[in-house]
Image: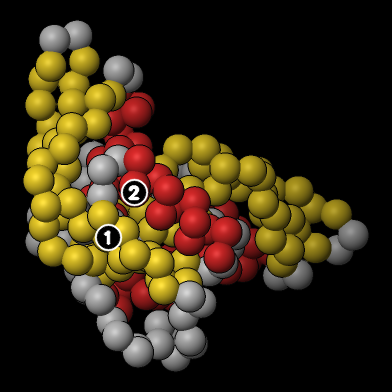
């Protein structure tokens, strides 16, 4: 996809409010095989722009591009179409992605039936404590991608991230296990949730 080879803006913390946030993470190393060295180089270039750890290995007539990012990062995008394009690219490359949206009753994502939907809202402000800067970056990437309002507040020797999501939003997930993991994460953070199978 040539559109994905453009310069990438990875935001940590998230960019302007008018941008749509897409969070991504690939905790364990994942390899993608390429027969064409130019395609492998292009793929590695995009991964480096996304601030991932990247390693390339040539063997048996092809190139493996390995990558990971153990922290959640986010992309600030201009349209839902860009979100869908990047989400498809990241998922094909092995990444877990998060994108909160308004409820889409009966709508298929990228022409495919969704498998699992978790709906959520948090009507009152709630604080998440971040004792390390990296933790704050992760919280901001996740909650901004979920479509929540966020405010960073100094609180003594650490910062708090205040979050709120007054309207119902939803998160489409690929498996039942992933849906339960994120539903529990949201419930533990004080959100109301509903899970559609």
Q: Are marks 1 and 2 in contact (CB under 8 Å)?
A: yes
Q: Where is residue 187 shown, x and y percent of the image?
A: 34, 47
The answer to whether residue 100 is visible is no
Q: Nearer the viewer, residue 146 or 60?
A: 146
> Please, what secondary structure does the residue beneath circle 2 have?
helix
Q: In the figure, is residue 61 to the left or right of 83?
A: right
Looking at the rendered structure, which numbered label has been put on residue 120? 1
Looking at the rendered structure, which numbered label has been put on residue 186? 2
The residue drawn where x is 44% and y is 90% is 111
* In the image, residue 152 above or below residue 81: above
Dot 1 alpha-carbon crowd within 10 angstroms: few under 14, some 14 to 19, many 20 or more: many
The answer for how far apart the CA atoms under marks 1 and 2 are is: 7 Å
* In the image, residue 13 above or below residue 173: above
Looking at the rendered structure, which numbered label has been put on residue 147? none
The residue drawn where x is 48% and y is 61% is 179
Q: In the figure, is residue 121 to the left or right of 97?
A: left
* In the image, residue 35 above or below residue 108: above
**Which colour style is shown?**
secondary structure
Q: Nearer the viewer, residue 179 or 111?
A: 179
Q: Nearer the viewer, residue 69 or 43?
A: 69
Sequence-wise, the earlier of marks 1 and 2 is: 1
Q: In the figure, is residue 42 to the left or right of 105?
A: right
Q: Quadrant of residue 93?
A: bottom right
The residue drawn where x is 45% and y is 38% is 71
The answer to whether residue 147 is visible is yes
Dot 2 alpha-carbon crowd within 10 angstroms: few under 14, some 14 to 19, many 20 or more: some
Q: Where is residue 88 shown, x and y percent of the image?
A: 47, 72
- What is the count of numbered marks? 2
> Please, what secondary structure does the residue beneath circle 1 have?
strand
């Amino acid at each position: 996809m040539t559109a994905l080879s453009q310069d990438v803006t990875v935001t940590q913390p998230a960019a302007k409010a008018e941008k749509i946030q897409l969070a991504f993470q690939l905790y364990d190393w994942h390899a993608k095989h390429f027969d064409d060295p130019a395609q492998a180089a292009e793929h590695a270039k995009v991964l480096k722009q996304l601030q991932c750890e990247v390693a390339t290995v040539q063997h048996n007539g092809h190139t493996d591009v390995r990558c990971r990012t153990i922290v959640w990062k986010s992309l600030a995008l201009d349209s839902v179409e860009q979100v869908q394009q990047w989400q498809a690219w990241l998922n094909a490359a092995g990444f877990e992605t998060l994108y909160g949206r308004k409820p889409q009753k009966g709508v298929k994502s990228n022409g495919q039936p969704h498998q699992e939907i978790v709906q959520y809202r948090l009507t009152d402000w709630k604080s998440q404590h971040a004792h390390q800067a990296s933790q704050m970056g992760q919280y901001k990437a996740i909650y901004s991608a979920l479509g929540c309002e966020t405010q960073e507040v100094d609180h003594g020797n650490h910062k708090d991230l205040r979050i709120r999501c007054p309207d119902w939003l939803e998160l489409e997930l690929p498996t039942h296990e992933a849906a339960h993991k994120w539903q529990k994460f949201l419930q533990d953070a004080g959100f109301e949730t509903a899970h559609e199978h």
